[in-house]
């Protein structure tokens, strides 16, 4: 009895979203679920932005005031005038194809360790020598690594620390 006197109305039951998405809506979101309501608000904002940008382009002004009417323009473009863009791969000559086949390594299956031929899959370790190794053979001293770490280290240090010399005589 107190609810009727105070004017509070208890909803009869849950209200389904008016977009028939299967979720429940509420009166605060115009009987839509939160996702449908958010999508509707975003569409309205995009439509207003597009209309205001078209209006500013039509009027030639950089900024538009809210008092100007919003004009929606539908532009129809015939499909015949639009050319599809087709990307064609360049066909290499026969001489270059035969040389590339000789140079390319053909992978015959999953990645395997270069030393013990154990399957490593995604857990393989790539060495600087260019091969893939398992956890046991990943270090350069555990496999016969052909990479020269000493000369690469010297080159890296020389590039990082260039020699700085001052001139012996001051130029006038």
Image (cartoon, rainbow, N blue to C red):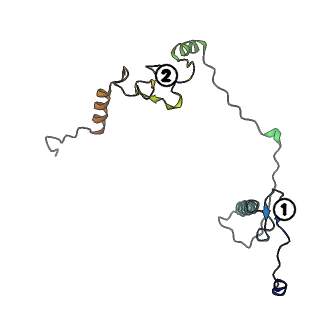
Q: Residue furthest left?
A: 169
Crowding around mark 1 (Cα neighbors within 10 Å: few <14, some 14 to 19, many 20+) is: some
Does residue 149 lie above or below 106 as drawn? below
The answer to whether residue 58 shows anywhere in this view is no
Q: Which of the 4 quarters of the picture holds residue 138?
A: top left
Residue at (37, 28) in percent of width and height? 139
Crowding around mark 2 (Cα neighbors within 10 Å: few <14, some 14 to 19, many 20+) is: some
Mark 2 — residue? 118
Does residue 39 lie above or below 89 as drawn? below
Are dots 1 and 2 in contact, CB under 8 Å? no
* Circle 2: element type: loop
Does residue 171 lie above or below 40 as drawn? above
Question: Relative to 70, is 145 on the left or the right?
Answer: left
The answer to whether residue 85 shows anywhere in this view is yes
* Circle 1: element type: loop
Measured from the top left, where is residue 8 in percent x and y? 81, 81
Q: Which of marks 1 and 2 is nearer the N terminus?
A: 1
Measured from the top left, where is residue 52 in percent x and y? 72, 63
Residue at (76, 60) in percent of width and height? 36
Residue at (55, 19) in percent of width and height? 107
Residue at (84, 87) in percent of width and height? 5
Name the residue nearer the viewer: 39 or 140. Answer: 140
Q: Residue furthest bottom?
A: 5
Question: Relative to 133, is 37 on the left or the right?
Answer: right
Question: Which numbered tag is attached to residue 18?
Answer: 1
Measured from the top left, where is residue 65 in percent x and y? 69, 71
- Quarter of the picture containing the N terminus is bottom right
Question: Relative to 64, is 32 on the left or the right?
Answer: right
Name the residue nearer the viewer: 14 or 86. Answer: 14
Which callout, 1 or 2, points to the residue nearer the camera?
Answer: 2
Give me the C-alpha separation between circle 1 and circle 2.
Answer: 59 Å
Does residue 131 lie above or below 36 as drawn? above
């Amino acid at each position: 009895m107190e609810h009727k006197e105070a004017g509070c109305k208890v909803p009869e039951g849950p209200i389904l979203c008016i977009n028939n998405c299967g979720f429940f809506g509420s009166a605060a979101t115009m009987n839509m679920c939160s996702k449908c309501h958010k999508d509707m608000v975003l569409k309205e904002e995009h439509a207003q932005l597009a209309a205001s940008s078209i209006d500013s382009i039509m009027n030639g002004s950089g900024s538009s005031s809210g008092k100007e009417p919003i004009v929606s323009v539908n532009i129809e473009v015939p499909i015949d005038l639009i050319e599809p863009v087709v990307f064609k791969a360049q066909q290499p000559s026969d001489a270059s194809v035969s040389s590339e086949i000789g140079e390319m390594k053909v992978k015959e299956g999953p990645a395997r360790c270069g030393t013990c031929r154990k399957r490593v899959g995604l857990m393989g370790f790539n060495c600087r020598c260019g091969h893939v190794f398992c956890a046991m053979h990943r270090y350069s001293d555990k496999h016969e690594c052909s990479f020269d770490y000493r000369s690469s280290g010297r080159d890296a240090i020389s590039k990082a620390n260039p020699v700085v010399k001052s001139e012996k005589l001051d130029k006038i």
